[in-house]
Amino acid sequence: MLTIETHNQAQPAIFTGSMAKIENRLKIIQDNSLESPREWDNMGTMYCEHRRYNLGDKNAQDISVYNYETEQRETPDKGYTILPLYLYDHSGITMSTGRFSCPWDSGCVGYIYFSDKDAKENYGWKIITKKRREIIAKHLKAEVETYDQYLTGDVYGFEFESVAVYPDGREEVQDTDSCCGFYGSDPEKNGMADCLIVDIKDCEVTTSW
């Protein structure tokens, strides 16, 4: 019976012949087939207006009103937690709740909001304090950051192969796995490492994007 050498210990295999070495090959790829995170069950509502891009939530309600004195649309001062949405458009698009340094290629395209009524129902609160509004704002910012990762292509998948490599150069695949939809490029932080059938430290990692 052939013995296959792994990083941790020797394991029996069903081959005959000389010694073979297991190589765990992990290929990280860019995920271009995912759905928009705005299709998920989000807390906030994202309303956007843009001439060329379809951004934000489908059928989102515009809660702003037109101020005839300033000749601008303004969002309500009360009853909502509201954050502005800025878009930077230059060789790709990226979104943030804060302004970008370049005024020529960026601007406000909408806002994300969560009503006090929904906050009270969801959290069981009777009043919305300053601290509670900060909690809501933190959640809304996180939603925008996730949506920005989607817009910028910062979403990945992996293709895994465990291969037996023989001294004569022959290779034989022992196991395969794949998964996608990981936000962020760090496999230790985006959950990718937790989905692998082996320790990521025992893998030969390559990227393709």
Image: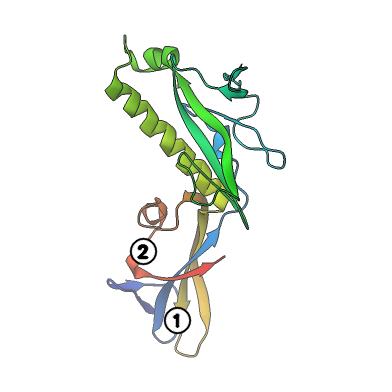
Percent from the top left, x then y, of residue 52?
72, 42
Residue 111 or residue 175, whichever sits in front: 111
Compared to residue 168, the image places residue 108 above or below, namely above
Compared to residue 61, the image places residue 58 above or below, namely below
Q: CA distance from mark 1 to mark 2?
A: 29 Å
Residue 104 or residue 125, whichever sits in front: 104
Residue 124 or residue 142, whichever sits in front: 142
Nearer the camera: disc 1 or disc 2: 2
- Amino acid type at circle 1 is Thr
Q: Residue at x 36, y 63 (%)?
A: 200
Q: Where does the C terminus fall, quadrant-wise?
A: bottom right
* Disc 2 residue crowd, few under 14, some 14–19, many 20+, Cα 10 Å: some
Disc 1 secondary structure class: loop
Could you say which quadrant of the image residue 21 lies in? Answer: bottom left
Q: Residue at x 31, y 73 (%)?
A: 7
Disc 2 marks which residue?
200
Q: Where does the N terminus fall, quadrant-wise?
A: bottom left
Residue 150 or residue 208, whichever sits in front: 150
